[in-house]
Image: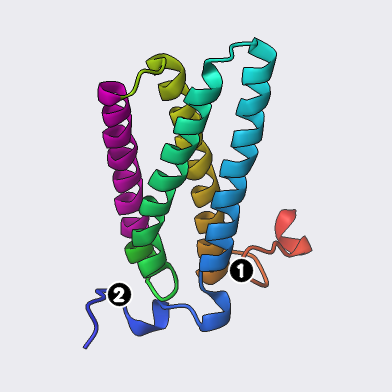
Amino acid sequence: MSLSTEPASVIAPPEQRVGTGALLGWTYGALSLTAGVLALVVWVAGQPQWWTCLTVATAIGFAAATLGLFPIILVAARGTPSQISFGFLAGTILRVMAAMAMLLLVARFAEIPRKPTAFFTVAYYFAALAAEVLVLVAGLRRSFPIRVPGTTAPGKVSPGSLT
């Protein structure tokens, strides 16, 4: 018995499912690239106290992104499009809540500048969000192609249909 409200024919075959390896790779790759860009910003700004802010924000960003990936990974491999969408929504909410809780703890107990730490954490949030959206949209598009009228294959336009 399945908990899915969609028919079994909607579930993609194994070779077309949203890959968790790609999701992890793109998310952590985006976070690493963001760390490099933010380190360049701190270096150019010449604010030595911001290095501590960047270190704390990096830890918050990676921890929140990891927590936010759990719901997505749970449904991405075998879920239907609606389940994957809800997993993405749950992951986004969990990531925001985790990042905000960690920021509040840092603001309460650490003696570091709060504004740069919050700015850097927001940058990590959007980097993880962009990577997840990119992978999930590409995976869903590949797994559940939309047939376009006048085409020979999903997503392909036949030359005669353009005139």
124 relative to 48, above or below: below
Residue 103 lies, in percent from the top left, at 33, 29
Colour theme: rainbow
In this orientation, which residue lies closer to the viewer: 26 or 5? 26
Q: Tell me which label, 1 or 2, sits earlier in the chain.
A: 2
Residue 134 lies, in percent from the top left, at 56, 50
Image quadrant occupied by the N terminus: bottom left
| Magenta-span inclusion, residue 102 | yes
**Three-letter residue code for mark 1:** Pro
How busy is the neighbourhood of tag 1: few (under 14 within 10 Å), some, or many (20 plus)? some
What residue does disc 2 label?
6
Please report the bounds of the magenta region as a residue range: 85-109
**Three-letter residue code for mark 2:** Glu
Residue drawn where x is 25% and y is 23% of the image: 108
Which image quadrant for residue 31? top right
Instruction: Report if residue 51 is visible in the image.
Output: yes
Residue 43 lies, in percent from the top left, at 67, 18
Q: Secondary structure at mark 1?
A: loop
Left or right: residue 84 compared with residue 21: left
In this orientation, which residue lies closer to the viewer: 12 or 53? 53
